[in-house]
Amino acid sequence: MRATTLVNQLLDLPGISVTGVSPEPGLLAVQVRLTARKLWCPLCSYSTWARYDTRPVASRWRHLDFGASKVVLSANLRRLRCPVHGVLTEWAPFARYRSDFTGDFEDVAGFLATRTDKSAIARFLRIDWDTVGRIIERVVATELDAGRLEGLVTIGVDEVSWKKHHRYLTLVSDHATGKIVWGKAGKDAATLDGFFQEIGEQGAGALKAVSMDMGPAFTKSVTANAPRAVICVDPFHVVKLVTDAFDEVRRTQWQAMREIDPVAAKLFKGARWCLLKNPENLSDQQAGTLRRFRRRGGILWQAYKLKEALRAIFHGDLDVDQAVTLVSTWCHQAQTSGMKPFVKAAATVRKHLIGITEALARKVNNGRHEGINSNVRLIIRRARGFHTAEAALGLVMLTCGPITIHLPHEKRAD
């Protein structure tokens, strides 16, 4: 068997024929030509038999390694004049537009990026992390479901931090599929306005419910762009608001105790998690510490009971009317407790009581979205080193969006 025939079968790439092979130490240079005589625009479906000219320099693409040797393909591509996009280099069916890698290489890199850290990818594929980020952006641009924004009825909106110093991504999820369907850097009303601009007035009019936190920015955007949609305030964020209020009371008590009894304050600080964790998740030792706090009583135990009382309302064993009545009662107790953090939290809860009621009645909440956000935080933490929001968003969409990456052997099997 000729070397070119063997390499052609091993590559198994669409639309090419191997014309030459130049093995070197650590490198296998493969010369190929496109088998199609017709020229296709890489940005649209336009095709033509007319050639504008031929690029004077051969185009090169990195392919998956053969053992310890890098594989580099090269081809002399033609150019065409597209009536829409002007003069462009013809489409190469085995690579994405303006990429220095084959599609197989990029699919493997994208698959690994969703499952391992940057050091492992860089070592395995012999590329740097910035290159991985650009590959992810290209894979998402071509493989993301183009119809993901169609037919949306109930959605969840939330923000997630992708970098220190208040760098955020706003993410929109489809409650029906549990997938992230849209994202953009930022977390203000203008950021979410971009989502409504993409789905248009018809798409916004079809929305029935939007779950979110109690921040004013998202509420402003939804009210302005989708007035028919009901805003559902996620109970998770209500509980989080009250938990933060309790933690503020706890810290204040700890600071006061430091001045009176530093030794006791140190033990008090170490008991933080037994107070913040759900009682059913406490270890035996933490449960014993909690019992000691209960016997001691005081402001801290009063705050703890308020926190747990609100959390119990959203366990799901109450009907809507009962839950709303208990929330109103809780707000009264919190506002008369004399603890400023709880007074403030109760005022916020009262302000959003209609949204809380809608969330309970429609059983629409951000629980699934919060689960996705947990995965997003894990992905971003594991992929330390993002320099742009676009790269971070690309990896989020690649992992949690409506997209499926097929590895080379899976594509060939199909």
Image (cartoon, helix red, strand yellow):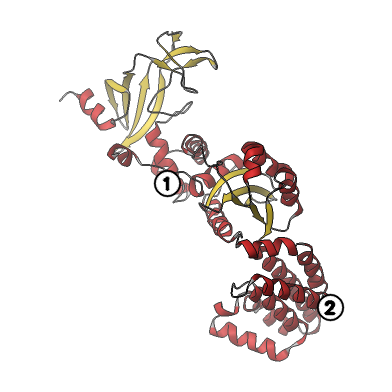
**100 left or right of 235 in image:** left
Q: Secondary structure at mark 1?
A: helix
Residue at x-position 64% and y-position 88%: 291
Mark 2 or mark 1: whose residue is earlier in sequence:
1
Residue 59 visible? yes
Residue annotated with mark 2: 336
Which x, y percent locates residue 355? 71, 60
Name the quadrant of the N terminus: top left
Name the quadrant of the C terminus: top left
Residue at x-position 58% and y-position 44%: 182
Residue at x-position 58% and y-position 59%: 370
Which x, y percent locates residue 372? 54, 56
Q: Quadrant of residue 373?
A: bottom right
Which x, y percent locates residue 410? 32, 42
Disc 1 marks a residue whose amino acid type is Leu
Residue annotated with mark 1: 112
Q: How many marks?
A: 2
Q: Residue furthest left?
A: 1
Disc 2 marks a residue whose amino acid type is Thr
Q: Secondary structure at mark 2?
A: loop
What is the distance, in whole Å, between disc 2 and disc 1 at their CAs? 54 Å
Camera-side residue of 337 and 174: 174
Camera-side residue of 255 and 105: 105
